[in-house]
Amino acid sequence: MFAHTLPQAYSHCRRLAQSHYENFPVASRLLPRATRDSVAVIYAFARSADDFADEGDRTEAERLVLLDDYADKLQAIAHGEAQNDPVFIALADVIERHRLPLQLFHDLLSAFRQDVTKQRYRNFDEVLDYCRRSANPVGRLLLHLHSAADERNLLLSDKICSALQLINFLQDLQQDACENDRIYLPQDELLRFGISESDLANARHSSKLVQLLALQRARTLTMMHEGARLGARLNGRFGLEIRLIIEGGMRVLELLCAHSATPFARPRLRKSDYLTIVWRSLHKQRHRGVT
């Protein structure tokens, strides 16, 4: 006998989604209720798995066991086996109703597992491979939920999601280095610019660091521009939601550029920034001509 009905499982996922503030489009009123619930379920899966990798004082082995258990539950869903975990009860329903690719969920678990076992990245290709699994599946799942997952849209979404992940890295340089002993800036580029890991951990400012971060921002901005056409390809409330996400990322990147002299200060969006984001998002033509 199972402890959770399907409505109870969905309610559990909604509560989990509403208890966090991350830049995941969980509670957007732009989306239909049915879609919001599905997004909340996907978020609940990703949030709880990410917490396994990051939160608490578990050992590395304990974290990996929990993530492996999630992978086993995904396999159980693939085989049509009933679940007794509210996240997976709801997730099985969402996957079945929307025909979501299970591999995208396995990709997310792979990234969380990598957070446990890998703290340094030799080059930008390694960073992008991490983004491919940590961020890109989210955009792809949103497209599948809205029956918009054609090849072109998926590729544009990958650009946007990878760029958003890179922006997050740029916002959390010192925090990642100090709290999690993770450095997502490529090691070969740190070496080229003469930046040490202690420079990041101790928030040590220098002209060389300014140059290194200028490279990171320029590369990320290019990716955002390349992916921004997706905002013009999608219609209705979902299209507006995607444009808001794109413009939100663009605005944070603009603030990072404007405050390049203080690279360890995390930009905070103000009311005027949100108004700018909304205004830009309402002008769909902005996204048609982006290159």
Image (tube, grey):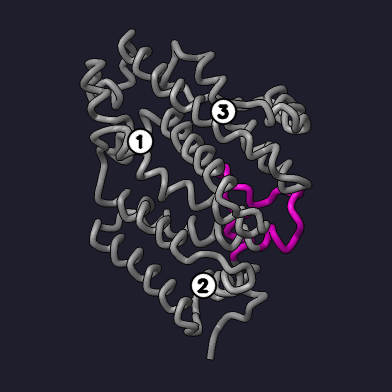
Where does the image place residue 30, in percent across and percent down from the top left? 76, 48
Residue at 72% of width from left, 44% of height from top?
A: 239
Where does the image place residue 220, in percent across and percent down from the top left? 47, 28
| Distance from Cα at disc 3 to Cα at disc 2 | 36 Å
Residue at 26% of width from left, 41% of height from top?
A: 119
Mark 2 or mark 1: whose residue is earlier in sequence: 2
Mark 2: few/some/many CA within 10 Å (<14, 14-19, 20+): many
Mark 3 or mark 1: whose residue is earlier in sequence: 1
Find out whether residue 31 is within the magenta segment: yes
Find out whether residue 215 is within the magenta segment: no
Where does the image place residue 167, in percent across and percent down from the top left? 48, 31
Report the number of numbered marks: 3
Tell me, for residue 176, which label it has, or none: 1
Amino acid type, label 2: Phe
Quarter of the picture holding the C terminus: top right
Labelled pair 2, 1 in contact (Cβ < 8 Å):
no
Amino acid type, label 3: His
Amino acid type, label 1: Asp
Instruction: Provide the residue span drawn in magenta.
Output: 13-37
Residue 5 found in image quarter: bottom right
Mark 3 or mark 2: whose residue is earlier in sequence: 2
Task: Identify the secondary structure beneath mark 2.
Answer: helix
Q: Which residue is mark 3?
A: 225
Of residues 291 and 131, which is closer to you in this image? 291
| Distance from Cα at disc 3 to Cα at disc 1 | 26 Å
Q: Is residue 177 visible?
A: no
Task: Give left or right: position of 11 versus 183.
Answer: right
Q: Which residue is mark 2?
A: 88
Residue at 26% of width from left, 37% of height from top?
A: 121
Of residues 222 and 243, which is closer to you in this image? 222
Task: Identify the secondary structure beneath mark 3.
Answer: helix
Labelled pair 3, 1 in contact (Cβ < 8 Å):
no
